[in-house]
Amino acid sequence: EAQVTQNPRYLITVTGKKLTVTCSQNMNHEYMSWYRQDPGLGLRQIYYSMNVEVTDKGDVPEGYKVSRKEKRNFPLILESPSPNQTSLYFCASSYRQGYGQPQHFGDGTRLSIL
Amino acid sequence: DAKTTQPNSMESNEEEPVHLPCNHSTISGTDYIHWYRQLPSQGPEYVIHGLTSNVNNRMASLAIAEDRKSSTLILHRATLRDAAVYYCILSSRGGTASKLTFGTGTRLQVTL
């Protein structure tokens, strides 16, 4: 089954403790991205990657890092999490970069930073 | 990015058609119109997209006005499982073409 898998689905942690949210897709997609969803603000893009070893900032990249060493994986790293990063996070992928490409989303990761 | 305007909420009875409107008066000639929906506790789900002509797929139909300043997502027979927030999104050519800018969408309630 074609899917985007995120782990963990839920996480409660404390300020400053490094964490990684993994994202994996099994569709051989070139384009992957991360969004965060906050009440009243909708979904906002954090980082995106057009292919292996090619990443770039989205609209709200501060406090986050990403890497794309393999085509299928695109982890989101919070080096020193802070409470304002408490949010619902979604990973998405599409066949390739392009403005007509449908995107597939994971089921989300709910992070709470205390 | 060009903006879209959608009603905050709509209601429908089960088994009836639903027409979800979207206004995008500042759309450019090369902007695609996308529709996604988000069911409770899930990630956004692609529904349909189009450029100029009306489009049909197994989930829905997309009717695009001749001047492209508005579009309508049509669910032919709403079911309880169609209750979700529906987002109308424009995407443009360019370096961040795949970025989807989500607004607040239309919350669709489906009742028996």
Image: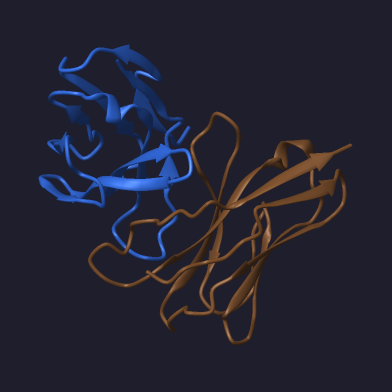
How far across and down, in percent of the image, does residue B97 sit? 31, 64
* Whether residue A83 is situated above or below residue B4 in the rendered picture: above
Quick one: quadrant of the C terminus of chain A? top left
Task: Find the residue positioned furthest to the bottom.
Answer: B67
Q: Residue at x 35, y 15 (%)?
A: A11
Figure quadrant of residue A87: top left
Side of A30 where A38 appears, left or right: right
- Quick one: B42 or A51, which is closer to the camera? B42
* Whether residue A80 is situated above or below residue B79 in the rendered picture: above
Tell me how the rendering is colored: by chain
Q: Residue at x 46, y 30 (%)?
A: A107
How far across and down, in percent of the image, does residue A102 sit? 44, 55
Side of A93 where B38 appears, left or right: right
* Whether residue B74 is situated above or below residue A85 in the rendered picture: below
Side of A95 where A2 appears, left or right: right
Q: Residue at x 47, y 78 (%)?
A: B27
Q: Residue at x 57, y 53 (%)?
A: B105
The chain coloured blue is: A
How far across and down, in percent of the image, does residue A4 sit? 39, 34
What shade has chain B been given?
Answer: brown
* Whether residue B60 is situated above or below residue B31 in the rendered picture: above
Figure quadrant of residue A77: top left
How far across and down, in percent of the image, does residue A37 sit? 41, 39
Figure quadrant of residue A64: top left
